[in-house]
Every structure is written in C-alpha cells, then in structure tokens.
Image (spheres, grey):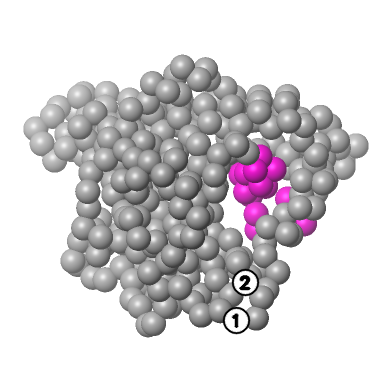
Amino acid sequence: MKTALRLAAVSTLALSSFGATITPQSANAVNFGERAVEQRNFVAVAAPVGETGRHQLLVIEQQSNARPCWGETGNRVNPLLLNFDFTGICGRFTDSNGYSLRTGGQDLGIQYSLRTVRRGNDIVLQGVPFRPNQPTLELGRAPYENDFVRIDLNEGWEFSKRTYQGRTLGHVYLSNPSSLSALASQSQPVATNPSPPSTPVEDESSQSQDWREKIELTEQQQEEIAEIRQAYLAENGRLQGQLDAARQELREMMIGEASTRQIRRQRNRVERLRNEMNDTRFSSMMAIREVMSLEQRTALVEVMDLTGSLDADTVLTTLLR
C-alpha cells in the first residue's frame, strides 16, 4: 500500500511540469513578436548537472553595467551572478519558461525544446521536436568538460527577445531568420569554434533507448501526449506574456502616482494569472496521466528514479522523438 501511494505521489510530482489540456485553436491564437538585442550581452552556457556528466542549457543576460554577470577563460564560463543578488543586473534562464526556438519569424516554443546532448567529445545544443516527423536542429557546440562551458552558436543563430502586444518580455529566443524547412535541408551545420576530433564517446542518444523500451508509448499515445504538451506550451506562453506585462505595469504603478486601491487591484490581477498558470499545469498533468496506463506510469517513475537528475519533460521528449 505504501509503495502504491509513493508511486502515485512521485508520478504526480514528475508530471507536474505540464499544463492544461486546451484546444489547438487556442494554441495557434498566440502571436508573439521579436525584438533584436545586443549579442554581446548574452551567452549560451552548457551547465553541468551535479556530478552526472550531463549538462543543461543556461542563458545569461547582462542587463546593466553594475557588475559583470559572467567571466570567460578559454571555453570555460564563470557564472559570476551566482555569487551576488543579480536582480536588475543579470538575467538567468534555465528552462522553456525562459527561452525557446524561433525560425523564419515563427515562434517554435510549442513545437521544439532546447536540449544539450553529448556527441563524442562535444556538447551539442539541439532543437528537439515534440513530434517525430519534424527535423532535429543543431544550433551550436561546445567542447565537453564537466564544467560550465560556452556554447558557440552556428552561423545564422542569435539571441533575441520575445514581445507580446508591443511589450518586450523577459523570454529569450534563440533565433534564425531562415525557415524551418530551409534549416532542415542543411545537412552539415558547423559551429563557429568546433572542438577538434578525438576518441569517440558513447552518445547520450544510445543511452535513451532503454527509456523507450521501458515505457513503450504507442503511436496514438505519442500523438495525444504531444498535442497536450504543445497546447500547454502555447497556453503557458500566452499566460506568461500577460503575467510579465501585468508585473511590469505593477512596477510602474508602484513608482508612479497610482492609488493604493489601484495598486492592490493590479496585484490581485498578477496573483490571478499565477493561479491560472498553476491550474493549467495541473489540468494537463491529469490529461497526460489519463493517456498512460498504470504500467507505463510505474515505468516512468522508475526511469525518474534511475536517472535522478532528469525531469519528466526530458524523459517524455525522448519518448516522443
């Protein structure tokens, strides 16, 4: 009985990174714009995940000149912002809430996730599709080290900021002016500073095969989960845009001449948007749970236990490839 309760609890937590079940029509209704930024104020970093030998994408933004947010020695990056309160000085983006992919003027946040994977002696930054019929994109590379290392973006890729209804948001794009189909046709993407060839090392992709064999989603299940995830990402992006705008308005009201009543009303709006995002996440969690069988949910929890540092989003992204 205790084991069953534990599995149910862990399964709920593991799937809590997903949001509400909404219709594809509402997903397509989100219309984000883009604003160019100064490239030298950003750096893409492959950040080590504990002592696992794995990395995740970290994007750092220098927002003011008060003090440097990072330092570089060769390919290694020193994330200086971890040593002080960087509020208003630095931006730190660690997941899909903070960054996403954009190509040919199209926001691909509901179609792709950004991942770092090991390929031989390189760390490769990839755009990984949620659906199996779309191409995987290579955005850049870094030499493999179990440390913070700079990812050199491939030619054509750069940083930009997401906009919503004329407001610049905190969300960062890794953007390319070429269309998705044009990028897919490029057979040999080259990083600006690729590391030299060396002794081959087992790819992470081969290690992920066991995950698929354990959980064994059917094609129909993959389609259903992919639709739930894409709808959630679109709705979450829409709500995040509204929340960012509401927070900015609240800050301006605090500085300006707004009355206490007006400020309180705006604060309540911010809290409502936060609650709506949480409700959206929980609803989608329940929808994904319904798609998977008891055996599959149990296998997912076992995979989470074995991998330790990987979250459900990483595991399910691999399953949907």
Question: Where does residue 185 sit, x and y in percent of width and height?
Answer: 47, 47
Q: Quadrant of the C terminus?
A: top right
Answer with left or right where residue 251 lies relative to residue 295. left
Kindly state the secondary structure of the residue where label 1 is placed: loop
At label 2, the amino acid type is Gly
Gap in angstroms between the C-alphas marked 2 and 1: 8 Å
Tell me the residue at 41%/44% (across/down). Answer: 182
Q: Main secondary structure of the magenta part?
A: helix
- Find out whether residue 219 is within the magenta segment: no
| Bounds of the magenta segment | 304-321
Q: Toward which corner of the image does residue 20 lie, by quadrant? A: top right
Tell whether label 1 touches label 2 (CB within 8 Å). yes
Q: Toward which corner of the image does residue 103 lie, by quadrant? A: top left
Tell me the residue at 66%/47% (across/down). Answer: 318
| Residue, disc 2 | 120
| Residue, disc 1 | 198
Query: Does residue 277 appear in the picture of this structure?
Result: yes
Among numbered discs 2 and 1, the one appearing first in the sequence: 2
At label 1, the amino acid type is Ser
Q: Nearer the viewer, residue 320 or 306?
A: 320
Question: Where does residue 130 sit, x and y in percent of width and height?
Answer: 58, 39
